[in-house]
Image (cartoon, rainbow, N blue to C red):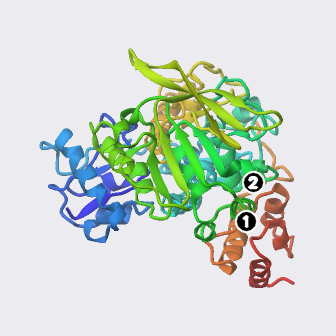
Amino acid sequence: MPYVVTQSCCSDGACVVACPVNAIHPAPGEPGFATAEMLYVDPVACVDCGACFTACPVEALQPHTKLSDAQLPFIELNAAYYREHPHADRPILAAIAQRPVVDARGLKVAVIGAGPAGLYAADELLKHEGVSVDVFDRLPTPHGLARYGVAPDHPKTKQVIELFGKIEREPGFRYRLNVEAGTDVTVEELRSSYHAVIYAVGAATDRRLGVPGEDLAGSSSATDFVAWYNGHPDADDVHYPLEAEACERAVVIGNGNVALDVARILTADPDELAATDISDRALLALRDSRVQEVVVLGRRGPADAAFTLPELIGLAGHDDIDVLVEGGVDAVEVTSQKTEILAELAARTPTPGRRRIVLRFHSAPVRLVGDASVEGIEVARTEVVDGRAVLTDDVVRIDAGLVLRAVGYRARPVAGLPFDDERALVPNEAGRVEPGLYVGGWIKRGATGFIGTNKSCSTETVAQLLDDYEAGLLSDPTTAIAPFDYEIDHAGWLAIDRTERALGEAADRPRVKLTDRRALSEAATPVVPRYSAAHAVRPSRSRTRRATAALGRP
């Protein structure tokens, strides 16, 4: 099997278009594309041309001869897809509908949100000559979850940012960063200044547990914890008590990919994290951390675990931490590739003194216990009845000083737009709220899918927008939104990027993120000649001196 899709697959779909023999599925437009855990290469049809490797923005496609021992399970994972979903009658080329180029010269669109969904939407629009797109974001930096959501020890997945850089250089593209829609500019002002507005603001909050003790100190959302270790400006002054003796054990509620990310970061070797773009504040805290065990709770059994198989394979391949299953081999019935790997983990013998992640199934939180802060969590065993996980009277206490809930993201209502509170999204038809007003990404479809899923999602939304434009349903702009004093444009973002990369180069890291708004604004402003590395907390004094020297500053 010449080429294999591996863990960092973002489902962008660029490889599908590049493949000359249509050997990569599910393709955009095919059943399962938006929900598949990854894309898969057909071992029979692949002709080893390497076109997919070149097209992949995150280096997920690799020749089978280049796989590490930990990646070898991906060979069977790719092949198994085609045993279950044969594509024997496929055409020679991938059949992906492409909208014909329309005459949209003079079309002005505002995109709210500079994450993957917003940038993919801008890309689709700018394929048409004469279109201009202004991308707004409340943060001083773009790229959304690609910058602040992807775990720092997944650098290949972050490479999609290089693709976004190409989009940013397209004619007609403009950034208006550090400007918050709904606060700095209203939806009415946006609609009078552009032919159309696309909201791609994501899902910024987390779901609640609804159990007693949830608001104790030491209880937090995985959403906030991820923002903290990824250097999000909103989390710049947050502290987690990892150095406390009670934090020798942490509990993560939920067992999706985010839960695995959090557990992995908490148990990772800080020296290895020091080579990533993790926040300096988080790195310092993790160096002092007492965490030895992270228990990951799932309401259902192993077969229904929410994490994807690629993420499980990646976790199982770590040789510096123990990954265990509570209850041992008796807790796992092998019915799938996922449970086969879980059974192998369940049979492992823990290594004394090594940090560990314990996957505990059929477990649901009942109450967080403690006085001023979390001291433990009461967990009920569950049974699946008629497809639902039902709590039993079998309740145990797990001592822990940190509890993180990772039970899903949730969108907030958007000022000036209708909102379905039950589904946590803006009601829409294929992205159209009404002519002139559109949505894309998680605010459109709910918090589902991967980074690359936003590409096909945004393509659908833009198609609706262009249909309305051709039908004469969009009003011409009557005003213009003047630049704000604090606004950051593309040149400002590039200045921030250069500063972070320079700090990173001096510290043998890909970048050192600036984590507070003042530092980011100063770095973005060319008239500030003496940016101080002191604005970013450094992991060591020697690194600070090296970074400052690299920028030519005292």
Tell me the amino acid under the disc marked 1.
Answer: Ile
Disc 2 designates what residue? 140
Q: Is residue 289 left or right of residue 545?
A: left
Please give the name of the residue rendered at 29% of the width and 44% of the height, measured from the top-left corner.
337
Q: Secondary structure at mark 1?
A: helix
How many circles with numbers are drawn on the protein? 2
Is residue 121 visible to us here?
A: no
Task: Give 422 or 16, whichever is nearer the viewer.
Answer: 422
As drawn, the residue found furthest toward the front would be 352
Quadrant hosting residue 224 = top right
Find out whether the residues at labels 1 and 2 contact each other: C-beta distance under 8 Å.
Answer: yes
361 displayed left or right of 268: left
Residue 50 coordinates in the image, percent (x, y): 28, 67
Q: What's the residue type where badge 2 is placed?
A: Pro
* Residue neighbourhood size for the residue with mark 2, other residues' Cα within 10 Å, grouped as few (<14), some (14–19), many (≥20): many
Residue identified by numbered label 1: 496
Residue at position x 74%, y 64% in the image: 284
